[in-house]
Amino acid sequence: MTSVEVQDLLALTRELADEELAPRADDFEARAEFPRELLRLLGKSGLLSLPYPVEHGGGGQPYEVYLEVLEILARRWLCVAQSVNIHVLSCYGVAAHGTPEQREELLPALLGGELLGANCLSEPEVGSDISAIGSTAVLDGDDYVVNGMKSFTSHAGQADFYNLFCRTGGPGVRGLSLLLADASTPGLSSLAPEKKMGVRSSPTATVVLDDARVPASRLVGRPGKGFLIAMGLFDRGRLGIAACAVGLADAALAHAVRYAKTRKQFGQPVADFQGVGFLLADMSTQVAAARALVREAARALDAGAPAGEVTAMASRAKLFATEAAMRVTTDAVQVLGAYGYVQDHPVERWMREAKLLQIIEGTNQIQRLVISRGLSGS
């Protein structure tokens, strides 16, 4: 795709974000209603399949362009940007590790824009240490019989297909595999959505697997490849969350600047006071630095850099961008003063939403662990 075509894509994204997302965000978040039809609209516009091959129905875009799209969406509504990221990640297993037959059969539907995917990794007693996953998949004839519980699953109850990371072999990472299950699979169900601090319109719930029968043909890659797939998923997921964090922080910065330029105290705009002006300057610097880290990591991924290098860069981007989003949104509330604490302005919602980004796709403590181990070679 030429640079002109990329600019057209970004212009389309801004138009959809401004006209379809921004006017609905506050209302949907207040009612904790999932914007399923908006996701279908984005799918029809080609935004749910951007980093995948054109021959399978994808957009054929570099990850750098895709992450810029996520940033634009998050600037208007984090829930929608996060949903796009979740769906794109849910297609990664088949796209990167599926057999040619699986790609031919499954990818066109997964990338077509109508379906929505979900990833089932975490369990009640398992978070970032996926080597401890306890959900089991036992081969029985032409099916795997899957049992277990998958907690904090985004899109649970709304997704059309689920990536199930489960144990087909012995203990440790070598025993993990990935199965792709339709939402209609008997024995697969979801509990009531969690009541969350922020991003309330994005459903998060526990997926229950009770003798769920998944065809053996839906095993993605070979048995025991689940950990390798998860590692690639983590790198891309962390970059997606980092891009969302940049968009959220940029929205908070822009709102704070507009307010500070129009709000007057002692006969002058509060932006002219050094205490506020310096705060805005720091916020702007945090956003710019976070964006640079995200773009740098995306370019390394697109260039085929070694996996360990990409992992470290993705973790640094996720760590810095989400910490920046938390600081910037909190400072935006401070710039607005009492007005920042009430729902007349969106900054209080953005501050609550920023907290989530420090937790999902591996907490920021886990990112520090990944980065430090990379430095020491352990």
Image (spheres, rainbow, N blue to C red):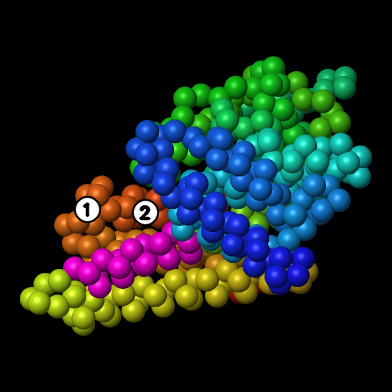
Instruction: Decide whether the magenta segment is chiefly helix, strand or loop.
Output: helix
Q: Mark 1 points at which residue?
A: 341
Q: Can residue 378 be seen in this view?
A: no
Residue sitting at 75 percent across and 21 percent down? 213
> Is residue 272 positioned above or below 180 on the image?
below
Amino acid carrying mark 1 in the image: Tyr
Q: Name the residue under label 2.
A: 350
Q: Which amino acid does label 2 sit on?
A: Trp
Position above or below: 156 against 355: above
Seen at 68% across and 35% down, the residue is 115
| Magenta-drawn stretch contains 98 | no
Residue at x 22%, y 69% (from the top left corner) = 262
The image quadrant where one finds the N terminus is bottom right
Residue 243 x, y percent position in the rendering? 54, 61
Q: Which residues are drawn in magenta? A: 246-263
Badge 1 density bin: few <14, some 14–19, many ≥20, Cα 10 Å: some
**Mark toward the start of the polypeptide (2 vs 1):** 1
Residue placed farthest to the right in the image?
A: 101
Q: What is the crowding at mark 2: few (fewer than 14 residues within 10 Å), some, or many (at least 20)?
A: many
